Image (cartoon, helix red, strand yellow):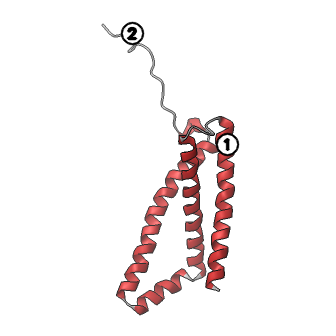
C-alpha cells in the first residue's frame, strides 16, 4: 500500500527559468560571484605561472612577458581581472554580512547589491589610479 506522501506531488527545485535574472539582482549577483571565483583562479593562475615561468627562464623571456602585460591588450585583460577581483572580494564581504544576520531582508539584499557594485567601481578606479601613478 503506497504511503500518503507518495501520492502527493513533490515540489520542484528552483532553476534559472524561475529566478528571472533580468528582473532580480540577487540571483544574478550570486551566480556572478561563483563565476568570478572560477575566473580568478584560472586567469590569475595563468598570469602567475607565465610571470614566474618567464622570470625563471631568463631576462629575455621575462622582458617579453612584461611587454605583453604592458601592451594595450595586456592592460585591458589586467583591468578586467582587477574588476573581477574586487567584485569577488566585495561580494564575499556582502555574504559575510549576511552570515552575521544583517541585511537579509529583500530591501537589504538589494541595497547591499547596489552598494557592492558601487564599491567595485570605486576600488577598481582607485587601484588603477594608484598603480598608474607608481608606474609613471
Q: What residue appears at the point 62 percent right and 77 percent down from the top-left corner?
A: 131
Work out which residue is located at the far bottom of the displayed protein and give it.
60
Residue furthest to the front: 100
x, y percent for residue 32: 55, 52
For residue 23, say whether it is visible.
Answer: no
Q: Residues within 10 Å of mark 2 (few under 14, many from 20)?
A: few
Q: Secondary structure at mark 1?
A: helix
121 above or below 98? below
Q: Which numbered tag is attached to residue 4?
A: 2
Label 1 and label 2: CA atoms lie apart by 41 Å
Is residue 45 shown to the viewer in this render?
Answer: yes
The quadrant holding residue 48 is: bottom left
The secondary structure type at the circle numbered 2 is loop
- Disc on the earlier residue, 1 or 2: 2
130 or 49, nearer to the observer: 130
Residue at 58% from the left image edge and 43% from the top image edge: 27
Q: Position of residue 111 (x, y in %)?
A: 69, 44
Image vertical order of residue 76 relative to residue 62, above or below: above
Mark number for residue 12? none
Q: Nearer the viewer, mark 1 or mark 2?
A: 1
Q: Is residue 60 above or below residue 97?
A: below
Q: Residue 93 at x, y = what percent?
A: 56, 51
Furthest residue in direction left, as rendered: 1
Q: Is residue 109 left or right of residue 41?
A: right
In the displayed structure image, the side of residue 88 where residue 136 appears, left or right? right
Residue 130 x %, y %: 65, 75
State yes or no: discs 1 and 2 in contact (Cβ < 8 Å).
no
Q: Residue at x 64, y 53 (%)?
A: 116
Residue at image mark 1:
110
Q: Quadrant of the N terminus?
A: top left
Crowding at label 1, few (<14), some or many (≥20) Cα neighbours within 10 Å? some
Amino acid at each position: 500500500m503506497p504511503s500518503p506522501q507518495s501520492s502527493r506531488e513533490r515540489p520542484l527545485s528552483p532553476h534559472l527559468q524561475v529566478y528571472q535574472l533580468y528582473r532580480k539582482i540577487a540571483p544574478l549577483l550570486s551566480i556572478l560571484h561563483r563565476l568570478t571565483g572560477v575566473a580568478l583562479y584560472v586567469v590569475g593562475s595563468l598570469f602567475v605561472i607565465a610571470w614566474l615561468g618567464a622570470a625563471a627562464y631568463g631576462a629575455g623571456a621575462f622582458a617579453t612577458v612584461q611587454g605583453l602585460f604592458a601592451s594595450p591588450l595586456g592592460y585591458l585583460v589586467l583591468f578586467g581581472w582587477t574588476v573581477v577581483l574586487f567584485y569577488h572580494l566585495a561580494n564575499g564581504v556582502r555574504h559575510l554580512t549576511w552570515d552575521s544576520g544583517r541585511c537579509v531582508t529583500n530591501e537589504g539584499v538589494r541595497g547591499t547589491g547596489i552598494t557592492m557594485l558601487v564599491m567595485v567601481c570605486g576600488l577598481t578606479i582607485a587601484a588603477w589610479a594608484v598603480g598608474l601613478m607608481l608606474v609613471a
